[in-house]
Amino acid sequence: MSHDDFAASLSSLLSGASVTDVRRLSGGASRETWQFSADGRQLILQRQRVGDGRDMGSEVAVLRAAHGAGVAVPEVLAAATDPGALGAAFMVLSHVEGETIARKILRDDTYSHAREQLTTDCAIAAARLHAIDPAAVPSLVATDQLQLYREVLDTVGYPHPTFELAFRWLAANKPAPTRSCVVHGDFRLGNLMVGPDGLRAVLDWELAHIGDPMEDLGWICVKAWRFGSTKPVAGVGDYDTLFAAYRTESGVEVDADIVRWWEVLGTLKWGIMCIMQAESHISGAMRSHELAAIGRRVCENEHDLFLALDGRW
Amino acid sequence: MIPHDVPTARQLVESVREWIERDVLTETTGRLHFHARVAINVLALVERELEIGPGQADRHRERLRVLGFESDEELAAAIRSGGVGESGDEAIALRAAVWASVRDKLAVANPKYLDADRG
């Protein structure tokens, strides 16, 4: 599709708006991201790559439901899963100005006020997204995360004694589900668009599923997502602030031990994901010394798992 | 005994790392600068592994032998199928042995992570 045809297709999707400044932002493994102007308003296009099997329609449905529930998310302005309009499944989103790079959010003076606000903002976003009626997004499926990552590790095929000790502890201490909710599934620093005033948008809903909402609260506290900070919640806040703000917004009392269980599972998950990232280099799927190096971060997670199993973190 | 001339493998890797630190970092910005930093970290890791890796391999093998296994794969499979180190002194010994090897891995991969250990 030529550049002009592409702009014309975008225009017709947006009621004939004048489309200009179409530019490619990045090319991930599963989708392309473009930015453009429509009648002067900055918009984002995400277009799925050929061969990516995920259902973008499901992500669109959950984004719309999240927007309706008052979660800070980009607004979906157009979307389709059939390749008729743009050659592949796509969604057009409102452009949200802000920063996603963790290092900048945690250290730059621009975000000093945001850092004070972010824990409460995240608690509110989580409480609201957990209040979405699962019936509004029927494409989301319930997954047993413990079972899922057991299977993922077996598929990747690098057994680790530490992981087996962690799986054993997790199985022995598995809490009963608190509720069955829409869960973001990758709710962490890096997927949060932050402005000087605080949280602007929750991004990357590709891993949304039905499950225990405490999964999201545990994941945002996993040590890797503190990026070197000593503060547990996304590197900016403490557990009590997160739990209190969540209770205020949702009316749900948080059991810290259950969140801790999810944080331990999250640490195990990231350990397994580190192997997967290295494997994507080794297999040739995406040659990169950055991905290769992540393989040597597995032991950080193993060390944290031992601290957790010792009750010392 | 290796037949190679000087520099040693460790010294060669060190020379490349020093070049990136001295000449590449100062001339780059943005993504290239970031990826140069990653490269420095990778090369420093390899230097540490070349220096302390052989001793770690001996200690790792000995820890597994004391537990009655020849490899991490065997030990992992045994923990998973149950009956190994589930309670008492055996559990303490198992955890201590596996954790010791994890600390050795960190000593190569990211020694600062151990320094920051609050536990």
Image (tube, coloured by chain):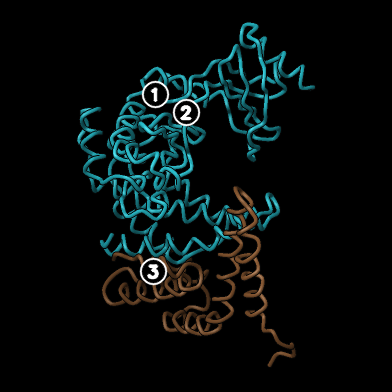
Chain colours: A cyan, B brown
Mark 1 vs mark 3, CA separation in Å: 43 Å
Mark 2 vs mark 1, CA separation in Å: 8 Å
Three-letter code, disc 3: Leu
Circle 1 crowding by C-alpha within 10 Å: few under 14, some 14–19, many from 20:
some
Callout count: 3
Circle 2 crowding by C-alpha within 10 Å: few under 14, some 14–19, many from 20:
many
Disc on res. A134: 1
Mark 3 vs mark 2, CA separation in Å: 40 Å
Circle 3 crowding by C-alpha within 10 Å: few under 14, some 14–19, many from 20:
some
The residue that label 2 is drawn on is: A140
The residue that label 3 is drawn on is: B114
Name the residue nearer the viewer: A176 or A291.
Answer: A291
Toward the bottom, the furthest residue is B1
Secondary structure beneath dot 2 equals: loop
Three-letter code, disc 2: Leu
Name the residue nearer the viewer: B72 or A313.
Answer: A313
Chain where mark 2 sits: A
Identify the residue shown where x is 52% and y is 19%: A76
Image location of residue B109, percent across then percent down: 50, 68
